[in-house]
Image: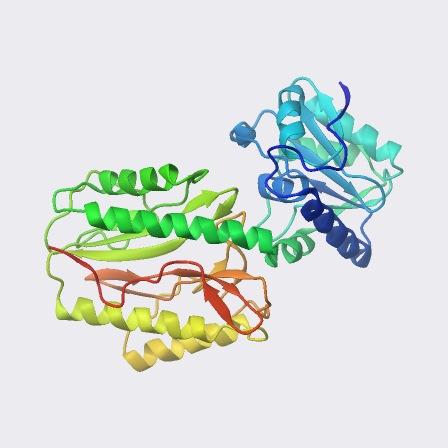
């Protein structure tokens, strides 16, 4: 165990952003920490760690060797990683101080405890990922052990602080989100040009995912697929061996991850000639979605947008199936605060990246389209290629 210096405060050769981007994030975090009376942030989950450290690695698939970031209110950030991660830290992260251990979780907890004593934080208020839509990246028993070793320290919830940091995207983040949406938009075009009756849902999935990877996506996104009468309610299920047949509606909630940033938007297509009712429902749901997007501007609240959708569905005589919200934030996580619903009082601000997905579920189809957009000073801008005005048909 020991310390490594991963370079000075410069931009490493494979960094996702320049060093100034991370310096700005640390400065904003420290200002929020001062307001909240926090002496440090302890970060252990993938997305918060990536956001604040810049360290990019696929090794989060392993639960045996966690990674930590300690961001003191005063002083430089410190990374805690196992030896195998040091080369990737040097290649991607502007954090200079890296403390290294060999083995699994226990030696890392030893290093954390020692660092908190060294920095005079053994009796400090330390923010951790304990609240809304947050998860610790180490076993809970080890977190309890860390707390027991530091009986005078207070580990408190920092979820609100972390989401406030991440909710407003920088121009560099928006560029990645824009590229992610463009990749997925092109994948939808490629998919629907290839879809034919007799194709299985797994083949649909593979065609879409392969297109995103060919175009440079880091990895596939969340891609549930369903098709056919009797299957329209399995909205969170992956593809099956079921084959497309005339009369089916095919629905995907597709996207990808580009440089860590998600796209997430739904499309649907008819296999063979759809009914007049299906065409009409598609047209109405799409119009309501775009009407709600057009209402997005700084100062509007999430309940106002939700109520607008509810009124529009009622006026159209359509069932309103919100599934707890009609949209959400988008970034390093596929779903981030805020939630566009009646309970979330968040006010729209420039730099937010959101989705809009009001839904009408029926026996003859799950009518949900979704777009991704960035809030601007004067309204919002679509990142996704808009869904077709009419229900597409594969003859």
Residue 38, percent across and down?
A: 80, 50
Residue 110, placed above or below residue 281: above
Q: Which picture quadrant has residue 212? A: top left
Q: Quadrant of residue 237?
A: top left
In this view, the residue in front, 303 or 391, is 391
Q: Residue at x 39, y 63 (%)?
A: 357
**In which quadrant will I find the N terminus?**
top right
Relative image position of residue 347 (x, y in whole percent)? 59, 70
Query: Which residue occupies the foreground of this view, 116 or 388?
Result: 388
Q: How far across and down, in percent of the image, does residue 350 sit?
A: 59, 66
Q: In this view, does 240 lie to the left or right of 395?
A: right
Task: Return the residue found at the far bottom.
Answer: 315
Q: Taking 372 as reference, is 175 left or right?
A: right
Left or right, 116 with reference to 140: right
Residue found 37% across the figure and 60% down from its top: 370
State whether residue 309 is above or below residue 338: below
Quadrant the C terminus occupies: bottom left
Report if residue 263 is visible in the image: no
In percent of width and height, residue 165 lies at 66, 55
Q: Quadrant of residue 313?
A: bottom left
């Amino acid at each position: 165990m020991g310390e490594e210096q991963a370079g000075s405060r410069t931009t490493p050769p494979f960094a996702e952003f320049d060093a100034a981007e991370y310096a700005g994030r640390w400065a904003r975090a420290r200002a929020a920490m001062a307001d909240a009376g926090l002496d440090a942030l302890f970060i252990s989950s993938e997305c918060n760690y990536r956001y604040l450290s810049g360290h990019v690695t696929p090794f989060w698939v392993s639960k045996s060797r966690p990674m930590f970031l300690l961001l003191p209110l005063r002083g430089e950030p410190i990374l805690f990683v196992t030896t195998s991660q040091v080369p990737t830290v040097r290649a991607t992260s502007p954090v200079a101080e890296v403390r290294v251990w060999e083995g699994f979780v226990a030696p890392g907890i030893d290093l954390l405890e020692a660092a908190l004593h060294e920095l005079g934080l053994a009796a400090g208020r330390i923010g951790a990922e304990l609240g809304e839509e947050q998860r610790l990246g180490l076993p809970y028993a080890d977190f309890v052990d860390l707390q027991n070793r530091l009986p005078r320290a207070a580990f408190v919830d920092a979820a609100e602080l972390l989401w406030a940091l991440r909710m407003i995207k920088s121009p560099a983040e928006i560029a990645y989100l824009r590229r992610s949406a463009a990749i997925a938009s092109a994948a939808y075009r490629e998919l629907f040009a290839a879809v034919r009756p007799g194709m299985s849902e797994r083949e649909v999935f593979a065609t879409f995912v392969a297109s995103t990877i060919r175009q440079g996506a880091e990895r596939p996104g969340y891609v549930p697929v369903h098709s056919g009468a009797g299957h329209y309610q399995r909205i969170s299920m992956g593809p099956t061996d079921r084959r497309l047949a005339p009369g089916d509606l095919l629905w995907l909630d597709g996207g990808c991850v580009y440089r860590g940033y998600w796209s997430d938007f739904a499309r649907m297509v008819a296999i063979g000639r759809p009914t007049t009712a299906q065409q009409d429902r598609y047209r109405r749901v799409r119009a309501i979605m775009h009407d709600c997007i057009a209402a997005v501007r700084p100062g509007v609240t999430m309940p106002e947008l939700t109520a607008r959708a509810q009124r529009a569905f009622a006026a159209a005589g359509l069932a309103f199936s919100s599934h707890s919200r009609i949209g959400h934030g988008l970034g390093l996580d596929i779903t981030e605060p805020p939630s566009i619903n009646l309970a979330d009082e968040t006010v729209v601000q420039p730099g937010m990246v959101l989705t809009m997905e009001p839904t009408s579920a029926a026996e003859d189809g799950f009518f949900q389209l979704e777009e991704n957009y960035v809030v601007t000073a004067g309204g919002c801008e679509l990142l996704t290629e808009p869904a077709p005005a009419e229900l597409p048909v594969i003859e």
